[in-house]
């Protein structure tokens, strides 16, 4: 477990360094969009190969309260302000 925690910390540092370099090359907002698109693609790929993919249905999206979707908006907004 400790190894996974250390690996996660290293990945965060490397990710921030790569994103900062990308931001200096193509711009802050463009690099943010690029980062989210790549993250979305990999999240979808990982979801498709996981055992969780079979349990996603239309009903599970409908049963989630509307305010729960605000987490994505708040997350993107906080990341935006952290990048400034």
Image (cartoon, helix red, strand yellow):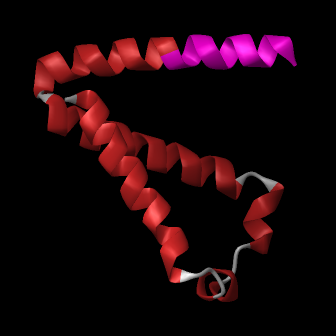
Task: Say if the magenta span includes residue 50.
Answer: no
Q: Could you tell me what secondary structure mostly forms the magenta stretch?
A: helix
Foreground residue, 28 or 67?
67
How many tags in the picture?
A: 0
Q: Is residue 68 above or below residue 35?
A: below
Left or right, 82 with reference to 61: left
Residue 15 coordinates in the image, percent (x, y): 44, 19
Quadrant assignment for the C terminus = top left
Quadrant assignment for the N terminus = top right
Left or right, 79 with reference to 81: right
Q: Is residue 72 above or below residue 63?
A: above
Foreground residue, 20 or 56?
20
Residue 62 coordinates in the image, percent (x, y): 60, 88
Foreground residue, 39 or 28?
28
Q: Is residue 73 above or below residue 41?
A: below
Residue shown at the point (44%, 66%) measured from the top left: 70
Q: Is residue 73 above or below residue 19?
A: below
* Residue extending furthest toward the right: 1
Residue 18 coordinates in the image, percent (x, y): 35, 16
Residue 79 coordinates in the image, percent (x, y): 34, 39
Residue 56, by quadrant, is bottom right
Residue shown at the point (77%, 52%) measured from the top left: 50
Left or right, 43 with reference to 17: right
Q: Which residues are magenta?
A: 1-12
Task: Say if the magenta span includes residue 11.
Answer: yes
Residue shown at the point (26%, 29%) measured from the top left: 83
């Amino acid at each position: 477990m400790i190894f996974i925690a250390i690996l996660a910390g290293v990945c965060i540092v490397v990710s921030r360094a790569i994103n900062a370099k990308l931001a200096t090359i193509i711009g802050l907002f463009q690099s943010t969009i690029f980062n989210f698109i790549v993250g979305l693609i990999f999240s979808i790929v990982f979801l498709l190969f996981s055992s969780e993919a079979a349990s996603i249905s239309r009903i599970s999206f409908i049963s989630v309260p509307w305010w729960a979707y605000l987490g994505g908006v708040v997350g993107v907004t906080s990341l935006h302000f952290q990048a400034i």
